[in-house]
């Protein structure tokens, strides 16, 4: 039967203790990943320390599939910085450049206007209905670094869910059939 038959025989011969060890190992890997993510959130001050660029609106600076590393500090946001922000009613964050910052003299609050480098106009059409500016609470972080093209894995798994299920199934089979 070949390789598949060998894998099925391998799964049948797994003892309870070995299965329990593999389940605990998988749990430790998942827990470690969550701890690392939460640690990055604390260190960077951002609710999402890593994001993937999903569109071409920031080309040529950032291309679709680039991974951005974010940091959120108390420093004032300045014109020209690249920020990641959330819009009320939308779950996917947006990566764009700050083109205008306006400080309200009465309250000291800062209003921010953004634009994608590859877009013809500002982002007011993207903001929530009736919203003309972003406030600090909308900003998730500032881009401080990036890895080109690495985010394509995420994009492909989101756009083609079958790839995600095949990958999860293959990894699960690998965990179950590993001898150590």
Image (cartoon, grey):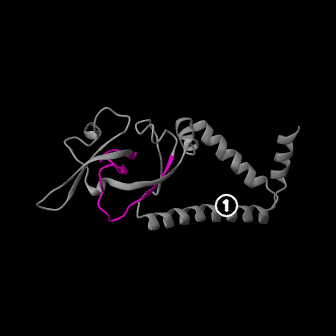
Q: Does the stretch in magenta take in 91? A: yes
Relative depth, front residue between 75 and 133: 75
Q: Does the stretch in magenta take in 115? A: no
Neighbour tally class for label 1: few under 14, some 14-19, many 20 plus, Cα within 10 Å? some
User: In the image, is 136 to the left or to the right of 62?
Assistant: left
User: In the image, is 11 to the left or to the right of 133?
Assistant: right
The x, y position of residue 22, in whole percent, is 73, 61
The x, y position of residue 147, in whole percent, is 54, 49
Q: Main secondary structure of the magenta part?
A: loop
Q: In the rendered view, would you say 74 is above or below 85?
A: below
For the point 58% across and 61% down, the residue is 33
Q: Which quadrant would the N terminus be assigned to in this image?
A: top right
Which residue ends up furthest to the right in the rendered image?
1
User: Which residues, given as a range, are shown in magenta?
Assistant: 67-94
For the point 82% across and 46% down, the residue is 7
User: In the image, is 131 to the left or to the right of 46?
Assistant: left
The residue at which mark 1 appears reads as 26
The x, y position of residue 167, in whole percent, is 66, 44
For the point 37% across and 55% down, the residue is 140
């Amino acid at each position: 039967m070949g390789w598949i038959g060998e894998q099925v025989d391998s799964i049948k011969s797994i003892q309870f203790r070995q299965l329990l060890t593999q389940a605990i190992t998988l749990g430790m890997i998942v827990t470690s990943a969550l701890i690392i993510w939460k640690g990055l959130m604390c260190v960077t001050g951002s609710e999402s320390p890593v994001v993937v660029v999903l569109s071409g609106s920031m080309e040529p600076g950032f291309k679709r599939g680039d991974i951005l590393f974010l940091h959120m500090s108390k420093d004032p946001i300045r014109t020209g910085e690249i920020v990641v922000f959330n819009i009320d009613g939308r779950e996917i964050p947006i990566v764009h450049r700050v083109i205008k910052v306006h400080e309200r003299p009465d309250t000291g609050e800062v209003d921010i206007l953004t634009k994608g480098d590859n877009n013809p106009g500002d982002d007011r059409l993207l903001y929530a209905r009736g919203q003309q500016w972003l406030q600090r609470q909308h900003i998730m972080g500032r881009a401080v670094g990036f890895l080109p093209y690495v985010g394509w894995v995420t994009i492909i798994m989101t756009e083609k869910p079958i790839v995600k299920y095949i990958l999860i199934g293959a990894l699960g089979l690998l965990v179950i059939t590993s001898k150590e």
